[in-house]
Amino acid sequence: MKRIVHKHPLAIRWFHWINFPILVIMIWSGLLIYWAYQPYKIQIGDVVLFKFFPNWFIQALNLRRRLAEGMSWHFVFMWLFTINGILYFLYTFLSGEWRFLLPNKHSFREAWLVTLHDLGLRKTAPPQVKYNGAQRIAYTAILVMGFGSLLTGLAIYKPTQFSWLTTLTGGYETARLLHFALTIGYVLFFVIHIAQVVRTGWNNFQAMVTGFEVEKERPESSPPTPSAPVNS
């Protein structure tokens, strides 16, 4: 027998599927802007160990000389990103969904057990209500990261008009570095999130589209067959 388990409200699914393409466009347009000034790399002395987005990467994605285009896309979708984020925050607060999203005192231990299970080092996953500890931490972190991206983005977008914000975020250079680091964080989250979706299968993906999962009910164990009497 199968049963339908309602999991995600319409609003959560709406915010999720709007936010995904917005973030993709924000990252893409951010690369168009980053082309004009590419300062970030890992080096020891004069030896460069790793450079973010080298020339072959820029050329392969045709990102050169598109600064104005990138800024136009970035600033338009910045407002959509902000509006969607504010509405999502208000909904989770007013509806009580935040109770399922915020980490609790067990979340970090659960997240460790989930990680061991995903790596194949633990046979069973820890029990969960709606989101496990790793999901609670990740989804809360994404919300904080979104707020950080907005603040640092405004600080480097209008450093004169929002001079107090630029100062608050550590100055223009620091704000730009933080904005860049948050973008790398989004990319890593996407990779892990998509890998998790593929690993958990179609049923979990369907829940974020339709709002429900189809689960198989466990058959009730039949009563033990009484043993035949033994004649003495």
Image: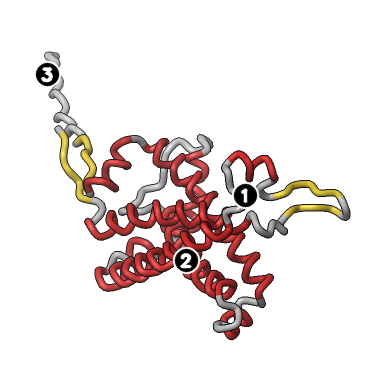
Q: Nearer the viewer's eye, disc 1 or disc 3?
A: 1
Residue type at tag 3: Pro
**Callout 3: few (<14), some (14-19), or many (20+) C-alpha neighbours within 10 Å?**
few
Front residue (pair 57, 20): 57
The residue at 55%/82% (across/down) is: 162
Query: What residue is shown with label 1?
Result: 64
Q: Quadrant of the N terminus?
A: top left
Seen from this angle, which residue lies furthest top? Answer: 231
- Height in image: 188 above or below 83? above
Q: Position of residue 169 (x, y in %)?
A: 61, 76
SS type, badge 2: helix
User: Is residue 187 toward the left or the right of residue 22 in the image?
Assistant: right
Give the image quarter of residue 58: top right
Residue underneath mark 3: 229
Element on which disc 3 rests: loop
Q: Residues within 10 Å of mark 1 (few under 14, many from 20)?
A: some
Residue in the picture at 21% in, 35% down: 216
Q: Amino acid at mark 2?
A: Phe
| Residue depicted at 47% across the width and 66% down the height | 75
Quadrant of res 179: bottom right
Residue 116 versus residue 12 in the image, above or below:
above
Chain-order first, disc 1 or disc 2: 1
Q: Earlier in the sequence, mark 3 or mark 2?
A: 2
Is 40 left or right of 201, judged from the image as shown? right
Q: Give the secondary structure at mark 1.
A: loop
Residue 75 badge = 2
